[in-house]
Image (tube, rainbow, N blue to C red):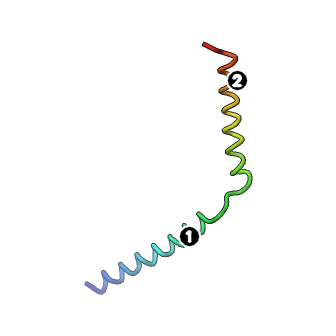
């Protein structure tokens, strides 16, 4: 029984190692251009829309 538990622990460590390596590679990748600047453009458009609505329809 102890040998089986030892095998499971080793398999779990291998899975963690694989996931950690994949996670490291994913984090190291730089997002594509359209995602990086697209998010900024959307936020700016929403800000401009909110500012326009505030100026056109004051309380």
Seen from this angle, which residue lies furthest left? 1
Q: Answer yes or no: do the residues labelled 2 and 1 have beta carbons within 8 Å?
A: no
Residue at figure coordinates x 71%, y 46% from the top left: 38
Seen from this angle, which residue lies furthest bottom? 3
Quarter holding residue 42? top right
Q: Tell me the element at label 2.
A: helix
Q: Is residue 11 above or below residue 19?
A: below
The x, y position of residue 55, in whole percent, is 68, 19
Residue position for label 2: 52
Residue at figure coordinates x 70%, y 30% from the top left: 48
Mark with earlier residue (2, 1): 1
Binning the other alpha carbons within 10 Å of mark 2 as few (below 14), some (14 to 19) or many (20 upward) gives few
Q: Is residue 30 left or right of residue 14?
A: right
* Label of residue 2 in the image: none
> Which sits in the foreground, 24 or 15?
24
Q: Is residue 30 above or below residue 15?
A: above
Q: Is residue 39 above or below residue 14?
A: above
Residue position for label 1: 22
Residue at figure coordinates x 32%, y 83% from the top left: 6
């Amino acid at each position: 029984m102890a040998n089986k538990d030892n095998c499971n622990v080793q398999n779990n460590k291998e899975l963690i190692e694989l996931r950690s390596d994949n996670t490291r590679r994913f984090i190291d990748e730089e997002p594509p251009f359209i995602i990086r600047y697209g998010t900024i453009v959307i936020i700016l458009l929403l800000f401009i829309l909110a500012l326009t609505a505030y100026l056109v329809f004051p309380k």
